[in-house]
Structure formats: C-alpha cells, structure tokens
Image: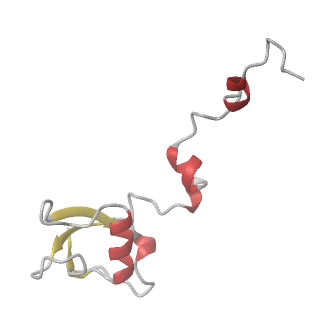
C-alpha cells in the first residue's frame, strides 16, 4: 500500500504543532527550575561560605567552568555573583584554571 498523494513524509517529521520554539535550556537541559541560575552562583559554594576575598572553592570553579565564566589568559577577570554579592574572579599567580581568586566588590 502506497501512501496517498496528500501524505508527505515531511508532515510526519515536522508536525504543525511541534514545539520547535522552545528555549534551548528547556528543550535540551530540562525545565529551568532545575538549572543553576547564571546570574547567581550561590548554590555552587559550600553552606559554610563567608563573603570575603578568597580562593574559589572547587565546586564554584566547576560551576564557573560549566558556565564558561572562568578567567583565562585572554580574559583575566570575570564578574560573578554569590548570594547576591558581586565578585571579581581573577587568575591566581600560576595562571591555571584551578588557581582562581575571588575579590568581593
């Protein structure tokens, strides 16, 4: 049995009610409430976090890397917010990704 002339394979691939205009975060990474907010990295620091100038903890460095917010040789300073407090993140003396220092603004 051949499909009728009114049938098009494109119709089955691209149904008219397909949600093609979903946001990238919702379509690939799930619903936004489960994503780390880009504007505040407070969930990436330990519960004992105290606001002050200090080296970035490993969990924060991982979150910054994932969000492409780590300082680099090309971009030696980045700005982040932790629990509503702004910080400048800079490369430490070694210049390596695991040597990030935070300065409270």
Q: Residue furthest bottom?
A: 48
Tell me what residue is drawn at x 35 percent, y 82 percent.
58
Percent x, y for residue 12? 73, 29
**Residue at the extreme right:** 1
Coloration mode: secondary structure
Residue 43 is situated, as x and y percent measured from the top left of the image, at 46, 72
In which quarter of the view is residue 73 placed?
A: bottom left
Question: Which of the two residues, 82 or 35, is positioned nearer the viewer here?
Answer: 35
Answer left or right for 99 relative to 6.
left
In the image, residue 18 lies at what x, y percent? 68, 32
Q: Position of residue 100 (x, y in %)?
A: 21, 77
Residue 4 in view here: yes
Q: Residue at x 79, y 12 (%)?
A: 6
Q: Residue furthest front?
A: 1
Q: Quadrant of the N terminus?
A: top right
Please indicate whether residue 82 sits to the left or right of residue 20 in the image.
Answer: left
In front of the other: 32 or 82: 32
Viewer-closest of 18 and 79: 18
Taking the spot 71% from the left edge, 28% from the top edge, the residue there is 15
Q: Quadrant of residue 89?
A: bottom left
Q: Is residue 27 above or below residue 13?
A: below
């Amino acid at each position: 049995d051949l499909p009728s002339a009114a049938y098009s394979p494109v119709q089955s691939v691209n149904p008219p009610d397909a949600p093609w205009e979903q946001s990238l975060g919702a379509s690939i990474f799930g619903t936004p409430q489960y994503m780390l907010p880009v504007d505040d990295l407070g969930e990436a620091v330990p519960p004992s976090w105290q606001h002050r100038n200090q080296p970035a903890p490993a969990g924060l460095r991982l979150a910054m890397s994932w969000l492409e917010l780590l300082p680099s040789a090309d971009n030696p300073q980045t700005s982040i917010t932790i629990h509503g407090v702004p910080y400048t993140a800079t490369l430490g003396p070694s210049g390596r990704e695991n040597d990030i220092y935070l300065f409270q603004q």
